[in-house]
Image (cartoon, rainbow, N blue to C red):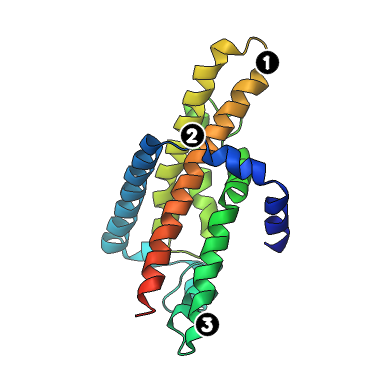
Amino acid sequence: MVSMTRDAFADLSFISFIWKRVRPKMCFEVFGILFLVTSTMILLLMFVPFMRIGWMNLFSAEGGNFILKPFTDLAESPQYFLRFIPLIFLVVLMFLAPFIVKVEEELFRYGHMEWGSVSRQSVKFGLIHLVLGIPLAAPLALIILGFFLGYKYRKAYMETLPYCGEDLNMAHARAMATSIAYHTVFDCMLFVFLLAGLAVSFF
């Protein structure tokens, strides 16, 4: 993460480029997807008991995200100053979001235009989150996000294609920028809600 932070400061233009693509309509769309993903996850957790299990449950009864858990646990620390650490960590994640997302989008979206391929990549995108140790319900719900991002990538590609001539890389570049922007907004919106939840622990 230190290396990624250093790279981010060295390429602030990329962060600016991605955020300049964000529009109010995009935020409303992403909020709707976040609501749908969250609702799906909650329903799975409520009605399918084994969906509450992730590999983190082998080490902790309450489970959780193995990357975030050490930081979120500090939010309840009796040492007041330690409660700032998870807040700072989430702010750093928000700053790095375009770079983290870029890796995921290149892996799961780039070059996938056929609906069958989009669907397969969406499933892979959701299930890869199992490595975080989160309950099974969350990766399954994230397949919805994967399909949404795949749709946005394909749509941007098809809209750009008529203006590209033989330069297909231009269409792929615009499509990637679009899916990265949507994905970045989703992650940052999620981080904002987490920040709000952690901030409550201060009072």
Q: Classify the position of the N terminus by image quarter.
A: bottom right
Element under disc 1:
loop
Tag 2: amino acid: Gly
Q: Are marks 3 and 2 in contact (CB under 8 Å)?
A: no
Q: Are marks 1 and 2 in contact (CB under 8 Å)?
A: no
Q: Which residue is mark 2?
A: 150
Marks 3/2: CA–CA distance: 39 Å
Among the two numbered marks 3 and 2 on one chain, the one whose residue lies closer to the N terminus: 3
Nearest to the eye among marks 1 and 2: give it.
Answer: 1
**Which residue does the image show at 64% across and 9% down from the upper left?**
165
> Residue 9 in the image: x percent, y percent?
69, 53
Residue occupying the point 60% across, 44% down: 15
Q: Is residue 108 visible?
A: no
Residue type, label 3: Leu
Q: Choose the circle earlier in sequence order: 1 or 2.
A: 2
Amino acid carrying label 1: it is: Asp
Give left or right: position of 49 versus 95.
left
Q: Position of residue 38 (x, y in %)?
A: 34, 54
Residues packed near mark 2 inside 10 Å, few (<14), some (14 to 19) or many (20 plus):
many
Task: Please tell me which of labels 3 and 1 falls first in the chain.
Answer: 3
Q: Position of residue 202 (x, y in %)?
A: 39, 79
When the figure is inspected, residue 22 is found, relative to residue 80, above or below; the finding is above
Residue 46 can be seen, yes or no: yes
* Mark 3 residue element: helix
Question: Mark 3 near mark 1, Cβ–Cβ under 8 Å?
Answer: no
Which residue matches tag 3?
82
**What separation in Å lies between label 1 and label 2 (alpha carbons)?**
21 Å
Q: Would you name the residue on which mark 1 appears? A: 167
The answer to which of 45 and 189 lies nearer the viewer is: 189
**Above or below, comparing residue 59 to residue 27 in the picture:** below
The answer for how far apart the CA atoms under marks 3 and 1 are is 52 Å
Does residue 62 appear left or right of residue 18 in this picture? left
